[in-house]
């Protein structure tokens, strides 16, 4: 009888200890997950009503998306938490990010996102909002080409036209039309740059004029291209950072 009571006591004590340890591990896991990246399951739980329909009733030309295929990227939400890497794309027509989760595509409303980054060939491609100018409001996501004393940005704009007549046929189709608008954020103001030209680009910085002209000449920059303009402003920002 005494041995039975002892076995009962030891068994009960072991179960209580096991429960206490399980509870501690659970609390530790919860505390750890609160500071780490937000998981795919958590994100889907927040956005379960935002599944994007994939079927289209009519033939459509073009695409609302920035890229032809979904690619790896990370979202930073307004609570400061980052997602794990997702296969995602930017729907420029809707101004929102969409990501693939198994066999469905889920949309992330823009108001939930602080910024997002695509990783392409090992290089980050950053998108952010908060700029205001003609044809651009603070809720529009823009691509940051250079950031610093001069922030050079591009707005990927997509419009949609219905019942567009196809050339040479009587068939009518819907069409997405893509366009890019460039802006300069400088000295607290954001202004649209209607044309990328050497004159328009080179007159933006108010200092280091000689150094910038020499750099553009030495590097043979084509300032009429986004790549050339971005390199030009990146060099200017470097000079400003080391300015005494």
Image: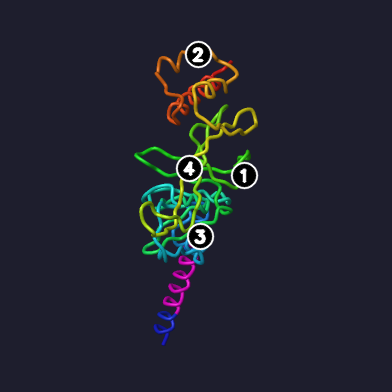
Q: Quadrant of the C terminus?
A: top right
Q: Quadrant of the N terminus?
A: bottom left
Question: Where residue 166 appears, x then y in whole percent?
Answer: 39, 54
What residue sits right under mark 4 in the picture?
Answer: 179
Task: Name the residue rendered at 39%, 37% in the picture.
Answer: 123
- Mark 1 lies on a secondary structure that is loop
The front one of 70 and 199 is: 199
Closer to the chain start, of discs 1 and 3, is 3
Left or right, 153 with respect to 227, comes to: right
What's the distance in space between the residues labelled 4 and 2, CA to CA? Answer: 33 Å
- Mark 2 lies on a secondary structure that is helix
Instruction: Judge depth for marks 2 and 3 and give the one in front.
Output: 2
What residue sits right under mark 2 in the picture?
Answer: 211
For disc 4, the neighbor class at 10 Å (few under 14, some 14 to 19, many from 20) is few
Closer to the chain start, of discs 4 and 2, is 4
The front one of 227 and 174 is: 174
* On screen, residue 171 above or below 144: below
Question: Where residue 71 appears, x then y in whole percent?
Answer: 37, 49
Contact flag, marks 4 and 1 (Cβ < 8 Å)? no
């Amino acid at each position: 009888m005494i041995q039975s009571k002892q076995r009962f006591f030891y068994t009960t004590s072991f179960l209580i200890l096991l429960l206490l340890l399980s509870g501690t591990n659970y609390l530790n896991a919860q505390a750890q997950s609160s500071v780490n990246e937000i998981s795919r399951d958590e994100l889907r739980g927040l956005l379960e009503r935002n599944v994007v329909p994939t079927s289209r009733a009519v033939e459509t030309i073009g695409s609302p998306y920035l890229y032809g295929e979904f690619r790896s990227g990370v979202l930073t939400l307004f609570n400061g938490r980052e997602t794990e890497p997702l296969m995602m794309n930017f729907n420029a027509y809707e101004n929102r990010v969409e990501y693939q989760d198994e066999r469905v595509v889920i949309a992330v409303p823009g108001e939930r996102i602080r910024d997002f980054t695509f990783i392409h060939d090992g290089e980050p491609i950053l998108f952010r909002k908060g700029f205001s100018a003609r044809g651009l409001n603070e809720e529009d996501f823009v691509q940051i080409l250079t950031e610093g004393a001069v922030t050079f940005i591009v707005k990927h704009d997509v419009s949609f036209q219905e019942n567009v007549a196809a050339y040479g046929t009587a068939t009518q189709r819907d069409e997405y039309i893509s366009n890019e608008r460039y802006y300069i954020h400088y000295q607290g103001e954001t202004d649209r740059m209607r044309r990328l030209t050497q004159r328009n680009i080179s007159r933006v910085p108010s200092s280091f004029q000689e150094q910038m002209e020499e750099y553009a000449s030495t590097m043979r920059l084509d300032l009429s291209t986004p790549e050339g303009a971005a390199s030009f402003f990146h060099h200017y920002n470097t000079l400003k950072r080391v300015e005494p």
